[in-house]
Amino acid sequence: MDFTFSAEDEAFRAEVQAFLQAKLTDGMRQAAARVTTVFADKDLAMLWQAILVEQGWAVPSWPVEHGGTGWGATKKYIFGEELARAGAPGLIPLGLRMLAPVLFKYGTKRQKAHYLPKMLSGEHYWCQGYSEPGAGSDLSSLKTAAVQDGDDYIVNGSKIWTTHAQFADHIFCLVRTDSSGRPQQGITFLLIPMATPGVRVAPIITLAADHEVNQVFFDDVRVPQANRVGPEHDGWNVAKYLLEFERGGGGAAARLRVSIDHLRAIAQTETDGAAPLWASSGFRARVSALDIRIEALQFAELVTLARLSRGESPGPGSSLAKNNTVEIDQAINELKLEAVSHYAMPHANLISMNGHNEPWVGPHHAETVTPRYLNSRAASIFGGAREVQKNIIAKVVLGL
Ligand SMILES: Cc1cc2nc3c(=O)[nH]c(=O)nc-3n(C[C@H](O)[C@H](O)[C@H](O)COP(=O)(O)OP(=O)(O)OC[C@H]3O[C@@H](n4cnc5c(N)ncnc54)[C@H](O)[C@@H]3O)c2cc1C
């Protein structure tokens, strides 16, 4: 297999690099480097989205007539890789990368015309209402109910772990419209404005002291049937189609390289009491082992890229990539924590949450380490839990 990029691809890479050099300010890079949560802060993400929209590069995978770039898989990969290398803030994927493909496939003309431009301009900000207190990996057991009432549905129930619901003005939701058949039957996909009477958002503060996720309650919420995407009771197929887009976007290996470089910089400064940690061959060996795993991940990404370029689907590669990416990321974060743990300081999020506004007193490079270590634990669960990915690998790759 040939892993080299063509001269045209390399010219495209140079064009992306020149764009990033010109438009991605130091302020934005620094703000992105301070993000310790899964998604960038809303304001930062929307600022960067507006710049990408102006360039015509915000939604490479959308059809060209709706604002897409028409790039093939390789250009999209290079773009993702360069964004990661440059330390650009991530765009919030919930609308642009997850709901949009669903609207292209299942949305009515009116839904596409109404929602897509507002998603791109940032006028609408979406959140995802799939999981419930009793339905996560086993999503089809969801119970939030929608009962027909004239031209509307009346929705009752609750969703949990809803990322950025506190900022969102719209939620796409899976609701139960029929309980008589198998759990996968009788599910319907609805679009609900968060300002509708009866919708209430309650914050969930995580182990990392972040307010990133929420529980959303629906109490007799009236939703027009015109807000349904796809046929009634057939939301399971719509839901599964959306999940195909939940992960990916390329550049995981490039992002991990940025993080391992940060680890190296920390280890060159911090000492084990006598010499810099980097002088310890044992510590260097642990970093090298992770470097090798990143290299392997990059080759796996290129194999997936080759499949996509041939018009094939990623296959079980996306499950392998998800578990590998998360494991490497968590291991890097663990080494960083080990390197700065002797400060034994509470982390910055917790200090500000408790109402203190003292400036950070530790070294700059330690500031994000604890919250990022804690936040990254959640990646074992979201986007398809680790064991669930292993089940897929066991079935599809190992034939067990
Ligand atoms: C930070 C974060 C953000 C999230 N954001 C959103 C969001 O915006 N919208 C949304 O709808 N949801 C969101 N989720 C929810 C997420 O999708 C669920 O947490 C996930 O699907 C797991 O469901 P659960 O929490 O009910 O855990 P469970 O499914 O109960 O899993 C608990 C444990 O059991 C294991 N397990 C489950 N089934 C099996 C099996 N068949 N075989 C072996 N082991 C198994 C899992 O791997 C896990 O370790 C978010 C979650 C987190 C942590």
Image: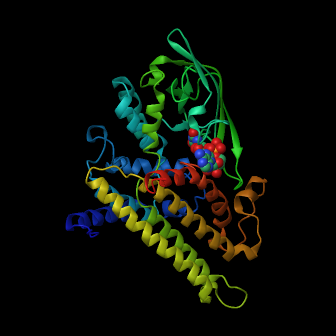
Position of residue 176 measured from the top left corner of the image (x, y, whole percent): 57, 24
Above/below status of 263 relative to 199: below
Q: Residue at x 52, y 8 (%)?
A: 150
Between 271 and 316, the residue placed more toward the observer is 316
Between 283 and 364, the residue placed more toward the observer is 283
The quarter of the picture showing ligand 1: top right
Residue, far top:
150
Above/below status of 215 relative to 193: below
In this rendering, position of residue 362 left or right of residue 84? right
Q: How many marks?
A: 0
Position of residue 337 measured from the top left corner of the image (x, y, whole percent): 67, 71
In this rendering, position of residue 355 left or right of residue 49? right
Residue, far left:
7
**Image quarter hosting the N terminus:** bottom left
Q: Quadrant of residue 131?
A: top right
Q: Quadrant of residue 307?
A: bottom left
Q: Residue at x 30, y 44 (%)?
A: 68
Q: Residue at x 63, y 21 (%)?
A: 197
Between 383 and 191, the residue placed more toward the observer is 383
Residue 67 appears anywhere in the view: yes
Between 172 and 395, the residue placed more toward the observer is 395
The chosen color scheme is rainbow
Position of residue 73 measured from the top left corner of the image (x, y, whole percent): 30, 54
Q: Residue at x 35, y 58 (%)?
A: 304
Residue 164 appears anywhere in the view: no
